[in-house]
């Protein structure tokens, strides 16, 4: 029997694979807000809470990404992984 933590990581990686493999020109195109949510949860799961400086004025995309990640506060990595999986299930199932 697999360990619960290992199953948790496998589910997260499977969800990441689904999102990364969405066709660029497919019939379903997630909104920028949806993709920003996935980005922030992914960063939180992989790196933990945002501790890097906010990008400068001339990097508006970087600032949006940073803001979304920073809003997650001190959420731990496991919670971020679970939230990513739950979000993917809500959007695609």
Image: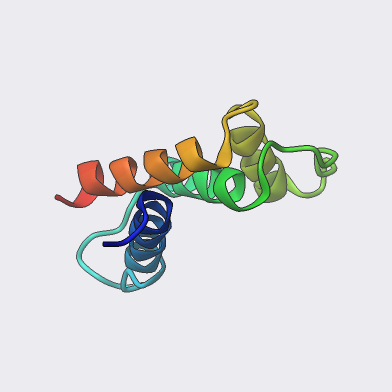
Please tell me which residue is depicted at 49% across the width and 41% down the height of the picture.
78
Please tell me which residue is depicted at 31% across the width and 61% down the height of the picture.
2
Q: Residue furthest left?
A: 93
The residue lying toward the viewer, choosing from 37 and 43, is 43
Q: Position of residue 77 (x, y in %)?
A: 56, 42
Please tell me which residue is depicted at 32% across the width and 65% down the height of the picture.
18
Q: How is the image coloured?
A: rainbow
The residue lying toward the viewer, choosing from 61 and 77, is 77
Asked if 70 appears above or below 78 in the picture, the reply is above
Asked if 59 appears above or below 10 in the picture, the reply is above
Please tell me which residue is depicted at 85% across the width and 43% down the height of the picture.
56
Residue 19 falls in image quadrant: bottom left
Query: How many numbered discs?
Result: 0
Q: Position of residue 62 (x, y in %)?
A: 70, 48
Q: Residue furthest front?
A: 1
Residue 25 falls in image quadrant: bottom left
Asked if 73 appears above or below 77 in the picture, the reply is above
Q: Position of residue 55 (x, y in %)?
A: 81, 44
Instruction: Identify the image quadrant of the N terminus.
Output: bottom left
Q: Residue 89 vs residue 63: left or right? A: left
The residue lying toward the viewer, choosing from 2 and 36, is 2
């Amino acid at each position: 029997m697999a360990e619960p933590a290992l199953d948790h990581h496998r589910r997260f990686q499977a969800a990441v694979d689904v999102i990364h493999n969405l066709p660029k020109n497919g019939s379903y195109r997630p909104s920028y807000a949806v993709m920003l949510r996935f980005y922030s949860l992914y960063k939180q799961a992989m790196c933990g809470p945002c501790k890097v400086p906010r990008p400068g004025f001339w990097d508006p995309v970087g600032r949006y990404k940073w803001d979304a990640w920073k809003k997650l506060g001190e959420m731990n990595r496991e919670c971020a992984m679970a939230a990513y999986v739950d979000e993917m299930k809500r959007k695609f199932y």
